[in-house]
Image (cartoon, rainbow, N blue to C red):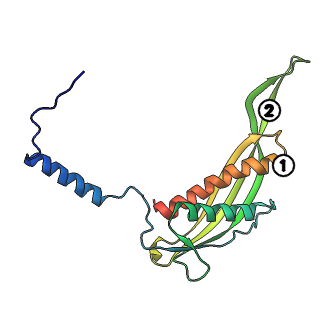
Amino acid sequence: MNFKIKNIKIRQPKFWLLLLCLGMLNSCYSFTGSSLTDEKTIQINEFPNNAPLVNPTLSQQFSTDIQNRFLQRTTLKGTKENPDILVEGEITDYSITPTTIGSNTVTNQNTGGVTQQSQNKLTITVKVHYENKLHPDFSFDRTYSDEAVFNSNLSQSEIESSQVKIATDRIINKIFNDIVANW
């Protein structure tokens, strides 16, 4: 198939007006979505684990993960002296509690009986202090919590390697969005 375009006149005023409008819209709106405009530096202190039940690796892992999130996904530079942004806090809860019996069933081949698998819930809560020295009205103190539900047959090491990561990633996403997107 051959297509021919006939009668295209670039000199038409409508074409130039449309091009001008598109150029103005492009310069007016940014798709980055970041509310951090003037801020250049960030300090993220270690989040100590002050929960009644202590996961020995949680504090270090959470602190490293939140630092990496900000340093990799923003143009902010890490500093220890006079930062534009300060993020600090503590882990206040780490708990594993049983939930109701799940709907997953397993048929036992030997007895012909049906066994329902129970589930547990891991809950992590983090208290965060965010201080924006350039825009103090954006600063806040908030508590973030998330959970991961898993089969009760997981070992403690499996919980700490997979379920803790799920819950902390969600908490870090919430913190990051509240600070960077300012929604």
Q: Where is residue 10 in the image (x, y as percent from the top left)?
A: 11, 45
Residue identified by numbered label 1: 156
Name the one closer to the observer, 93 or 57.
57
Name the one closer to the observer, 147 or 69.
69
Report the amino acid beneath label 1.
Gln
- Image quarter where the C terminus lies is bottom left
Q: Is residue 89 left or right of residue 101?
A: left
Residue at image point 76% right, 54% down: 95
Residue at image point 23% right, 52% down: 22
Instruction: Using the image, determine if residue 131 lies above or below residue 149.
Output: below
Report the amino acid beneath label 2.
Gln
Quarter where residue 87 is shown: bottom right
Residue identified by numbered label 2: 117
Which SS class for mark 1?
Answer: helix
Which SS class for mark 2?
Answer: strand
Q: Residues within 10 Å of mark 1 (few under 14, many from 20)?
A: few
